[in-house]
Image (cartoon, rainbow, N blue to C red):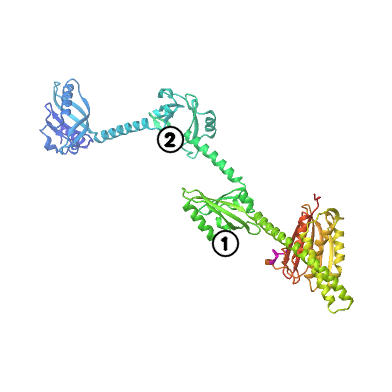
């Protein structure tokens, strides 16, 4: 049976070997009497190696231990923190030490129990934390961006950049202020109304206006994060003064709006492209393409609005304009609108923003329709002028001998000479041509009078009736039901000449007979429209554009002067003459005369 003292020793030994702290016992001179297992783990020596020896200590630790030993004479125990000890392998460890003196019955110290806790890792962590905190403090103090901490409805921290941006001389001028003291009232109301939570709503527009101490206003962009400040929840705000940036952006936006407006309202069609894709069209370009809005074209390739035969030319120009930065001169192209036929245009291009991922190319387009029409009118006018001069000269040279010839032919006819009738018929034909020359070359003063167009056309139909019967052609006149008396101001004799020429051509285009429909109606655009429709052989499309030119005729014996004269007469009446035809189906001629008075 174990004695009670033996049991107590066993319990104490088990406790010492199981505790997480290093424990060893020394006598009053520092000689080691015993050590537990944790001591062996901490220092690397075995229990047997240290018993009877003194623990190796640094000079600092020895001085501290000596002073502690003296103090322990006066009290029961003493605690030491951060004491340096040597290990068996030469390394040092930091330990917190509790020294408890053991006294005999008379109160004299005969031994010491030293309990040590390894705090090496903890102290290193604390040093690193302290070092990190110091670096963070330096970073915060030297950071050029303002940082403030908001807690319990007031500012509790501000770095130097924060109070400098506010125009304060010291952080104390800011600390303790409520946010409402310096945030613009409208922005504060917006923030409160929207209940902006910078953590939950990072996409919110976190830009506010700050009123500085001197009364000036700056614009600040901020981001926020929840932190603990001195053990309490707080909000840390990282701010950035974007006043100059905002002002520059506003000026840039204003300039871009101004330039966009200039482009939009430009009198010439303008198209912007990136990598060949349309990104912008102004109003004139949309109108030219017969669209209603830009969305009909944005996103389409630029080649899609031009004739396919010109795609290679356009691709080469687009590539060269980006590479060379040179202005590409106007070239003629065919534009394909959403509706209708292709339009003759000319286009120039230039790269306006090269140094982007996708350079922007500006294309300026000019509609050539009016110019082409004007050029055609000039060419026709020149032809008419030349034809008029030629006609005047030819008529002058032919008319006098022609008169003599006809007189002598009539004398010969009295003698019943053969072939005289044929010769007279040919001389009459020459006389008719000469008269047409004279009518074309001689300027005539026009006297406009109010005329019933129905009666005028009926008189022409009566005159042309014999020729119509000869060709087995019927003529029919229709007047719109709401027009009792279609009146127009014109020169009656000249307009009769126009209708006679037109009806004569219509009759001669139907050698096998047919029907000519003549209609009169108001076209609602201020014109009285006469439409003459025949069932003749028609006019080929490639020749239709030349009808009315001098000396161009589809008839064997035609001179081409008849329709030319008709065109001139209708233009003198401020009217329009249009011809539409389909081969083997017939021709439609429209004559539009203005209803208003002609000065």
Q: Kindly check if marks 2 and 1 are in contact, taking CB atoms under 8 A apart as contact.
A: no
Quarter assignment of residue 304: bottom right
Q: Nearer the viewer, residue 556 or 261?
A: 556
Image position, residue 301 (x, y; %): 55, 56
Q: Nearer the viewer, mark 2 or mark 1?
A: 1
Image position, residue 427 (x, y; %): 81, 71
Q: In the image, which disc is placed on residue 308? A: 1
Circle 2 SS class: strand
Task: Identify the mark nearer the N-term, 2 or 1.
Answer: 2
Q: In the image, which disc is placed on residue 275? A: none
Circle 1 SS class: helix
Q: What's the residue at 86%, 79% (across, down)?
A: 417
Image position, residue 78 (x, y; %): 21, 25
237 left or right, relative to 330: left
Question: Is residue 366 in sight in this rendering?
Answer: yes
Q: CA distance from mark 2 to mark 1?
A: 59 Å
Which range is magenta?
Answer: 543-547
Vertical order, 311 against 232 (above or below):
below
Q: Residue furthest left?
A: 52
Q: Nearer the viewer, residue 15 or 517?
A: 517
Q: Which residue is mark 2?
A: 225
Image position, residue 517 (x, y; %): 81, 65
Q: What's the residue at 85%, 65% (across, down)?
A: 461
Vertical order, 283 against 470 (above or below):
above
579 left or right, relative to 233: right
Q: Residues within 10 Å of mark 1 (few under 14, many from 20)?
A: few
Q: Nearer the viewer, residue 449 or 439?
A: 439
């Amino acid at each position: 049976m174990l004695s009670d003292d033996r049991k107590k020793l066993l319990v104490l030994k088990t406790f010492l070997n199981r505790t997480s702290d290093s424990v060893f016992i020394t006598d009053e001179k520092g000689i080691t009497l015993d050590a537990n297992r944790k001591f062996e783990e901490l220092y690397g020596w075995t229990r047997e190696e240290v018993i009877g020896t003194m623990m190796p200590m640094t000079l600092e630790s020895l001085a501290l231990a000596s002073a502690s030993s003296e103090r322990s004479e006066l009290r029961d125990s003493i605690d030491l923190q951060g004491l340096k000890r040597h290990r068996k392998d030469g390394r040092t460890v930091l330990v917190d030490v509790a020294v408890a003196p053991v006294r005999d019955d008379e109160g004299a110290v005969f031994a010491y129990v030293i309990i040590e806790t390894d705090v090496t890792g903890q102290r290193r962590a604390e040093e690193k934390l302290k070092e990190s905190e110091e670096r963070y403090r330096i970073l915060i103090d030297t950071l050029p961006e303002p940082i403030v901490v908001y807690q319990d409805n007031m500012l509790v921290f501000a770095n130097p950049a924060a109070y400098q941006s506010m125009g304060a001389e010291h952080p104390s001028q800011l600390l303790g202020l409520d946010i409402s003291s310096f945030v613009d009232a409208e922005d504060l109301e917006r923030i409160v109304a929207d209940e902006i939570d910078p953590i939950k709503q990072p996409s919110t527009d976190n830009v506010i206006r700050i009123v500085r101490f001197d009364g000036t206003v700056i614009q600040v962009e901020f981001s926020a994060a929840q932190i603990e400040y001195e053990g309490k929840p707080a909000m840390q705000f990282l701010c950035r003064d974007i006043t100059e940036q905002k002002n520059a952006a506003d000026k840039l936006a204003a300039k871009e709006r101004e330039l966009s407006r200039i482009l939009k309202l430009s009198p010439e069609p303008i198209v912007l492209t990136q990598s060949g894709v349309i990104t912008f069209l102004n109003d004139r370009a949309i109108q030219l393409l017969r669209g209603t809005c830009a969305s009909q074209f944005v996103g389409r390739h630029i080649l899609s609005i031009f004739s396919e035969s010109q795609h290679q030319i356009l691709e080469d120009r687009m590539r060269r304009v980006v590479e060379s930065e040179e202005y590409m001169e106007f070239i003629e192209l065919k534009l394909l609108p959403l509706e209708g036929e292709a339009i003759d245009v000319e286009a120039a291009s230039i790269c306006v923003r090269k140094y982007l991922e996708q350079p922007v190319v500006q294309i300026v387009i000019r509609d050539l329709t009016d110019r082409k029409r004007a050029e055609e009118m000039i060419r026709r006018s020149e032809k008419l002028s030349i034809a008029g001069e030629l006609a005047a000269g030819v008529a002058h040279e032919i008319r006098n001998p022609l008169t003599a010839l006809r007189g002598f032919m009539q004398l010969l006819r009295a003698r019943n000479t053969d072939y005289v009738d044929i010769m007279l018929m040919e001389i009459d034909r020459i006389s008719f041509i000469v008269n047409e020359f004279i009518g074309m070359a001689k300027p005539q003063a026009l006297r406009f009078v109010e005329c019933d167009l129905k009666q005028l056309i009926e008189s022409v139909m009566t005159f042309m009736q014999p020729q119509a019967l000869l060709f087995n052609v019927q003529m029919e006149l229709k007047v719109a039901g709401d027009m009792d008396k279609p009146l127009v101001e014109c020169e009656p004799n000249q307009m009769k000449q126009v209708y006679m020429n037109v009806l004569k051509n219509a009759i001669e285009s139907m050698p096998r007979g047919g029907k000519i429909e003549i209609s009169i109606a108001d076209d609602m655009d201020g014109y009285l429209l006469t439409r003459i429709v025949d069932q003749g052989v028609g006019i080929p499309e490639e020749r239709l554009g030349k009808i009315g030119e001098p000396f161009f005729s589809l008839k064997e014996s035609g001179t081409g002067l008849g329709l030319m004269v008709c065109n001139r007469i209708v233009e003198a009446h401020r009217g329009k003459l249009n011809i539409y035809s389909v081969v083997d189906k017939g021709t439609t001629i429209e004559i539009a005369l203005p209803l208003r008075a002609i000065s």
